[in-house]
Amino acid sequence: MNTPAAPLTTREKQILRRMALGRSDAEIAHQIGGSEAQVATQRLRLLRKLNIYLHAEIIEAAIDLGPWPYQMKRPSSPSRLS
């Protein structure tokens, strides 16, 4: 990952961390507010800003941000049949 010219905004950090957890644009939009289209646009700009192309790089960038300042809920998993 390349260091961005400008520091990441709070919103970019929120999106990056959720991307690292595998959240979809729709899930991210629901969790942080805004529309799915807004999140998709912000996600693309963020990836360009960080020069990221691989999911592993997204995870690395999220880890580099340090401790997560908020609790994030895990998505509910489908119930399993016994």
Image (spheres, rainbow, N blue to C red):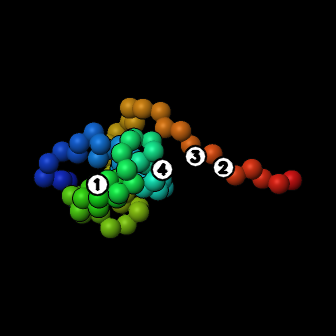
Question: Mark 2 packing: few (<14 Cα in 10 Å), some, or many (20+)?
Answer: few
Marks 2/1: CA–CA distance: 27 Å
Question: Mark 1 packing: few (<14 Cα in 10 Å), some, or many (20+)?
Answer: some
Residue 19 percent coordinates (x, y):
41, 53
What residue does disc 3 label? 75
| 2 or 1: tag closer to the N-terminus | 1
Say which residue appears at 13% left-offset and 52% top-offset: 5
Marks 3/1: CA–CA distance: 22 Å
What residue does disc 1 label? 42
| 3 or 4: tag closer to the N-terminus | 4
As helix, strand or loop, the secondary structure at mark 3 comes to loop
Residue 79 percent coordinates (x, y):
74, 50
In the depicted structure, whether residue 8 falls above or below residue 53: above
Amino acid found under the numbered disc labelled 4: Glu
What residue does disc 2 label? 77
Asked if the residue at tag 2 contacts the one at tag 3, i.e. Cβ–Cβ closer than 8 Å, the answer is yes
Amino acid found under the numbered disc labelled 3: Pro
Q: In the rendered picture of this protein, how many numbered marks are placed on residues? A: 4
Residue 9: quarter of image: top left
